[in-house]
Structure formats: C-alpha cells, structure tokens
C-alpha cells in the first residue's frame, strides 16, 4: 500500500498533466464566450487585389491580408473562413451580415454610417495612371474632360467624386488597369501597389505611366458592421499583439507580388 504522501504526490502529478496551459487568455471572458458561440469568423477577401488578396493557381485566396488575418486568428485562437469576392460584393456582404469582417478597407468618412473600423494595420498610396505620352496631368483636377476609370465602391470612386469627375466604373482592379492599357479609358485612379503589380505581370510599362506624387495616402483597417463592438474589440486586441517583426516578415514575403 502506498503511503499517504506518495498518494498525494501521484494525484498532484496527474492533475499537472491534465490541466490546460496556464497562459493567460488575451481576451476577456465575455469576448472569449462570444467567439466560442460564434464558432467561425467569416471574412470577405479580395480575389483580384494583389499583393493584398488574390487567387492562386489552385483557386485559393492568398496575399498579405490573408496572412495577416491568419496570424491574428492564431494569436487569439479562433477560426476564420475566407470568401473571395469583388470589392463591391464584400461591402454588401458586410452590410447584410454574410461577412463578419473583410480582408482590409480604408477608413473613409462616408463609410462610417454602416461600418466601424479597427486600428490601422497598413498604409497604401493611391495614384493617377495615364498613357506614357499623355502630358498635362499632375493632379485630380487635371482629369476633368478625360474618361477616367475606377473600381466601383473603391476609395478611388470617392476621390473622383470629390474632384467632380464622372468616372467609368469597373468591377475588378485587373479590368480597370487593362482598360487603360487598351485605350478604353484615358486615365485611372487606383492604389499604387495593385496597379504596379499588374504592370509588371503583364509587361505594360510601355502602355501605362504613374503620375507622381500620389493623390492619397490611406490606412487599411479591419472593418465590422456598425455597432458590432464585441468583434471590434477582439480585432483591436489581436492587432495589438502582432509585433513589428511579424509585420515586416509578412510584408517581406509579399514585397515582390
């Protein structure tokens, strides 16, 4: 028969191996309970917005924003499911509750009525692009009288509206770039990293020229439907846990995209 002291020691060792990790949960009990009840966070992501989100050869969504979301979910221990869609459909999906959040979105005053925004996680510049032989275009005001292409629902549409332009609307970023390359529009207003990617990918250096300086500098955030304070708090907590080194690692991975 074991001595009482040995029995107690055996029980304590068993408890030690059966107890979960003592690492403190970064979320409040209410936030954790909300995530457990929710099960999976559904994210509308870009299908044609490289380097931030696009489909690989297997049709799976990849990109900087996807990696960022996966890291955030790992930090807070919750599941995400990505749903590739055009930007316009992403916005509608967030509004009607199909999506809980999106890959990333600019904080624009006109969106505040329907969307709440997390802390920013990335800065993106927006530029004017024209044919290489077009002169006299330096600012948005110089686009008056020209046929200008933008993506519907994108911040470029707001920029065009603010400059009193009547732009031609496109569904995807790729078709907007190709419209300029093929002469269907005379200029486009789009985010610089995205257009530069399509120029490199399709060897369009002799068909498209970037106008300097950029016309806008915007911060990418993780949006939630207006009033969803619980998820917004969870996302902001996750963003606060991502280190600068981890951010640089993701950026470096996609720097050539």
Image (tube, helix red, strand yellow):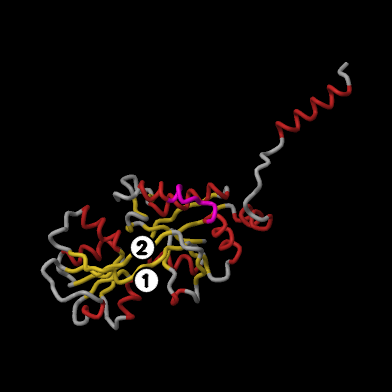
> Would residue 119 appear left or right of 65 to someone viewing this image?
right
Q: Where 101 sits versus 226, above or below?
A: above
Q: Nearer the viewer, residue 131 or 147?
A: 131
Disc assigned to residue 166: none
Residue receiving disc 1:
153
Measuring 80% from the left and 28% from the top, which residue is drawn there? 11
| Distance of label 2 from label 1 (alpha carbons) | 17 Å
Q: Where 13 sits versus 91, above or below?
A: above
Helix, strand or loop for the magenta stretch, by majority = helix
Mark 1 is surrounded, within 10 Å at the Cα level, by few (under 14), some (14 to 19) or many (20 or more) other residues, namely some
The number of discs equals 2
Q: Quadrant of the N terminus?
A: top right
Q: Position of residue 190 (x, y in %)?
A: 29, 67
Asked if the stretch drawn in magenta spans residue 244, the answer is yes
Question: What's drawn in magenta, residue-wise?
Answer: 240-247
Q: Nearer the viewer, residue 147 or 200?
A: 200
Mark 2 is surrounded, within 10 Å at the Cα level, by few (under 14), some (14 to 19) or many (20 or more) other residues, namely some
Please report contact status of discs 2 and 1: CB closer than 8 Å, yes or no.
Answer: no
Q: Position of residue 214 (x, y in %)?
A: 28, 68
> Would residue 17 appear left or right of 124 to someone viewing this image?
right
Q: Secondary structure at mark 2?
A: strand
- Considering only order in the chain, which callout, 1 or 2, is on the residue closer to the N terminus? 2
Judged from this view, the residue extending furthest toward the left is 133
| Quarter of the view holding residue 110 | bottom left
Q: Position of residue 91 (x, y in %)?
A: 43, 67
Q: Where 151 sits versus 13, above or below?
A: below
Residue receiving disc 2:
124
Judged from this view, the residue extending furthest toward the top is 1
Asked if the stretch drawn in magenta spans residue 48, the answer is no
| Quarter of the view holding residue 106 | bottom left
């Amino acid at each position: 028969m074991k001595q009482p002291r040995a029995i107690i020691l055996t029980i304590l060792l068993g408890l030690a191996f059966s107890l979960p990790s003592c690492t403190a949960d970064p979320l409040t009990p209410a936030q954790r309970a909300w995530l457990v009840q929710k099960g999976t966070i559904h994210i509308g992501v870009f299908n044609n917005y490289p380097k931030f989100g696009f489909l690989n050869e297997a049709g799976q969504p990849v990109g900087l924003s996807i990696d960022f979301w996966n890291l955030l979910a790992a930090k807070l221990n919750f599941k995400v499911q990505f749903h590739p869609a055009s930007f316009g459909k992403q916005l509608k999906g967030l509004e009607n509750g199909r999506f809980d959040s999106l890959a990333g979105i600019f904080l624009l005053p006109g969106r505040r009525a329907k969307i709440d925004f997390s802390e920013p996680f990335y800065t993106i510049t927006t530029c004017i692009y024209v044919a290489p032989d077009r002169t006299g275009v330096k600012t948005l005001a110089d686009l008056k009288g020209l046929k200008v292409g933008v993506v519907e629902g994108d911040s470029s549409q707001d920029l065009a509206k603010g400059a009193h332009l009547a732009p031609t609307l496109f569904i995807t970023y790729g078709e907007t770039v190709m419209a300029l390359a093929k002469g269907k529009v005379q200029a486009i207003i789009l985010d610089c990293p995205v257009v530069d990617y399509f120029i490199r990918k399709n060897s369009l250096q002799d068909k498209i020229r970037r106008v300097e300086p950029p016309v806008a500098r915007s911060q990418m955030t993780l949006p939630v439907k207006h009033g969803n304070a619980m998820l917004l708090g969870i996302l902001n907590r996750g963003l606060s846990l991502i280190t600068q080194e981890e951010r640089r690692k993701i950026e470096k991975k996609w720097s050539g995209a």
